[in-house]
Amino acid sequence: MKTTVSVIKADIGGLAGHVTVPKELLEFAEKRLRENVETGLINSFYVTHAGDDLELIFTHFKGVDNEEIHKMAWDLFKDATEKVSKKLKLYGAGQDLLRDAFSGNIRGMGPGLAEMEFEERKSDPIAIFMADKTEPGAWNIYLYKMFADPFNTAGLVIDPKLHDGFTFTVLDVVEGKEYKMNSPEDIYDLLALIGTPSRYVIKYVHRRSDGEIAAAASTTRLSLIAGRYVGKDDPVLIVRSQSGFPAMGEILEAFSTPYLVAGWMRGSHTGPFMPVPLRYSKVARFDGPPRVVGLGFQVTDGKLIGPVDLFDDPSFEHVRMMAARIADYIRRHGPFMPHRLGPEEMEYTTLPQVLEKLRKRME
């Protein structure tokens, strides 16, 4: 029987603005998921947060895009909004829930989603990454480093199980079309697309030798669904590790440089992507900087064993310090590009309302 790992997140209310998720929301989600384990709908779960996003991590045997599973998560977010977020007057209560009623699939309704289904190996370690204050395209450079860059992933050169490369499924979030590109021969074409992360987003990575799923990422762009700024997308990512996939250390090595990503304050600024442990899973300076939490699990007989807090390690302290220095530098640009995003991205913020007021002053 194949095991499905699902990660579903939503910003349904922040404590002290956009800083973090209160314990009341975490406890509500844990109680609801525990009930779903007892009924047999899901096998195991872990509830956490990345910044002000509530993160649901769970396993089941129902496959990806299962209506019953998605409705369970949707109802949890809706009920938590009504019974906890609004009662506590949390900031942005229910802001990621962009539809009034469930329509069979949570995709396109606001919450972020990454899922994968696979036959368990003799040992099946996975890494789950959860971001706050950035967009799905933020994963592009990291997935490229993990699965296509031999300077990052030594196994691409010396491990025969990785030597054939990987297939990247890239989604054009504007036109809704997909490209399938192979490494290493399509690397230049792949980079031509994913170097524009606001439009082209890596959705899946598969091993070329047998088509086995290697990574799955959320691709929700809230502004494109709502037609306006309603908060940043805050994506999630699942990556399988070891024995035919990059080693856990190679996966984490991709985060040894805090690359610049879009989002940060009001979803309108470029900033460094800071890898942090759970204890730093809150955003403060200028509502950021954008950050990523990483958890490691074993998937065993359909259940999650763990987690391990992957960035809670001294080897990432210098990365956080580098991110802090980059934040100092780019913040000094204030309202000027490249700190502020380009006009095509700012169309989905509140800036157009300001520009509209200025029309009367045109000569």
Image (cartoon, grey):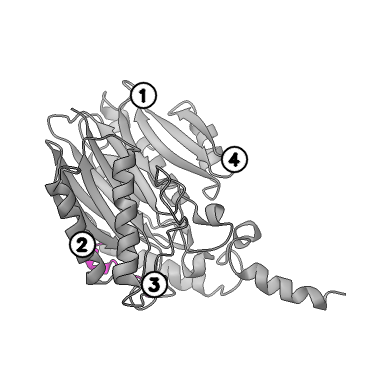
Mark toward the start of the polypeptide (4 vs 1)? 4
Please state if 291 lies on the left or on the right of 315 as rendered.
right
Which mark is first along the chain, 3 or 1? 3
Does label 1 or label 2 sit earlier along the sequence?
A: 1
User: Tag 3, which secondary structure?
Assistant: loop
Name the residue furthest right: 363
Q: Nearer the viewer, residue 169 or 9?
A: 9
Q: Residue furthest top?
A: 209
- Amino acid type of the residue tagged 2 in the rendering: Pro
Whether residues under marks 1 and 2 lie with C-beta atoms below 8 angstroms apart, the answer is no
Can residue 150 be spotted in the picture?
A: no
Left or right for 358, reference 29 = right
Image point (58%, 62%), residue name: 341
Label 3 crowd (10 A; few <14 / some 14-19 / many >=20): many
* Residue 175 badge: 4
Mark 2 sits on what residue?
314
- Residue 348, x across and y down, in percent: 59, 61
Q: Earlier in the sequence, mark 4 or mark 3?
A: 3
**Residue on which disc 3 sits:** 18
**Secondary structure of the residue carrying numbered label 4:** loop
Describe residue 208's horizontal placement relative to residue 248 as left or right: right
Task: Please name the amino acid that badge 1 sits on.
Answer: Arg
Q: Identify the mark nearer the N-term, 2 or 4.
A: 4
Q: Are marks 1 and 3 in contact (CB under 8 Å)?
A: no
In the figure, 141 relative to 90: above or below? above
Write the start and end of the magenta stretch as one range: 276-284
Q: Indicate the position of residue 225 as horizontal and vertical percent values.
A: 53, 52
